[in-house]
């Protein structure tokens, strides 16, 4: 799994500008999705270089009615102290992602539970899948939830994306997208309804992925400051690196 990097992670959006220093990703179909509208630095920027990119992205987003800027920084590199100080003084939120991978046979045994059923999303259960995701996405506002619903519909039509839906005693309880490539199966957007936490639903969804894609490396990205990363480590996922990011929301 040494060849797996953040480059293997699926990105929703298109490159609209690129130079030697960074790539600009934009997704007009979902302007509210920060992870689809950002600049990714190829090399660590100086403070003046960051400010220049910041002005460019802010102006570009303003033209599209977007009130945020987001930046990703080169993998496995710490941020320069002066850059961190500037971003904190300017009201940025700073965080980091962690990359994990596992060979399916290394995933721990998960006991069968007749109360939990995992289904591949089809025409028959698509609306149930969409309703469950909409419920969770409403936390970020109805406009975002509506745009995310349309993204989920587009993903349903994409043969490289498999959507899974978990039920607990017949009630929709969790979901996940699996992005399939030649070498990897990426777990993305794993969600378990708050009412069904700690019932093994997340593990059952992952087990389903392991069984269906046993010939691939299963990969995922976790928030470096969130609790699920501890679960992945306990499940034998291998830590492969980190990447810093920052974002700022401007008042309308």
Image (spheres, grey):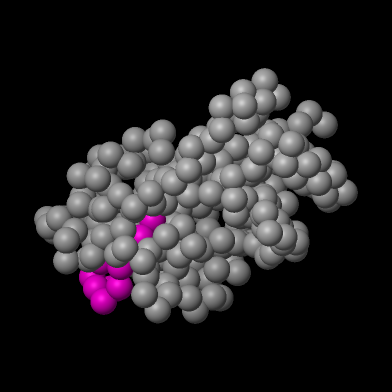
* Position in image of residue 47 (x %, y %): 69, 34
Q: Is residue 131 left or right of residue 28?
A: left
Q: Is residue 120 left or right of residue 247?
A: left
Q: Front-most of 204 and 33?
A: 33
Q: Quadrant of residue 12?
A: bottom right
* Position in image of residue 48 (x %, y %): 74, 36
Residue 17 vs 55, above or below: the answer is below
Residue shown at the point (70%, 56%) measured from the top left: 24
Q: Quadrant of residue 251?
A: top right
Q: Front-most of 146 and 17?
A: 17
Q: How many marks?
A: 0
Residue shown at the point (60%, 54%) measured from the top left: 42
Q: Front-most of 22 and 150?
A: 22
Residue 90 vs 105, above or below: the answer is above
Quarter of the image for the C terminus: give it: top right
Residue 172 vs 94, above or below: the answer is below
Magenta residues? 210-220
Q: Confirm whether the magenta stretch covers residue 145.
A: no
* Position in image of residue 78 (x %, y %): 48, 37
Residue shown at the point (54%, 35%) measured from the top left: 79
Q: Is residue 116 left or right of residue 11?
A: left
Q: Quadrant of residue 152?
A: bottom right
Report whether residue 68 is seen.
Answer: no
In the displayed image of the protein, which residue is found farthest to the right? 63
Q: Confirm whether the magenta stretch covers residue 218.
A: yes
């Amino acid at each position: 799994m040494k060849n797996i990097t953040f480059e293997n992670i699926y990105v929703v959006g298109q490159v609209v500008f690129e130079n030697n220093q960074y790539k600009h990703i934009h997704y007009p179909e979902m302007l509210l999705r920060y992870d689809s509208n950002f600049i990714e630095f190829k090399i660590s920027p100086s403070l003046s270089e960051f400010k220049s990119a910041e002005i460019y992205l802010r102006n570009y987003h303003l033209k599209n009615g977007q009130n945020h800027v987001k930046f990703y920084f080169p993998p496995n590199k710490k941020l320069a102290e002066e850059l961190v100080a500037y971003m904190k003084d300017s009201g940025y939120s700073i965080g980091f992602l962690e990359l994990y991978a596992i060979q399916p046979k290394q995933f721990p045994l998960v006991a069968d539970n007749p109360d939990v059923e995992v289904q591949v999303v089809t025409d028959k259960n698509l609306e149930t899948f969409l309703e469950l995701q909409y419920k969770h996405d409403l936390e970020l506002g109805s406009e975002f939830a509506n745009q995310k619903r349309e993204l989920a519909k587009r993903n349903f039509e994409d043969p490289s994306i498999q959507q899974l839906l978990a039920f607990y005693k017949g009630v929709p309880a969790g979901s996940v997208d699996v992005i399939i490539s030649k070498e990897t199966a990426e777990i993305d957007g794993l969600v378990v309804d708050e009412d069904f936490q700690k019932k093994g639903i997340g593990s059952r969804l992952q087990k389903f992925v392991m069984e269906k894609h046993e010939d691939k490396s299963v990969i995922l990205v976790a928030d470096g400051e969130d609790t699920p990363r501890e679960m992945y480590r306990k499940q034998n996922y291998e830590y492969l690196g980190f990447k810093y990011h920052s974002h700022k929301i401007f008042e309308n």
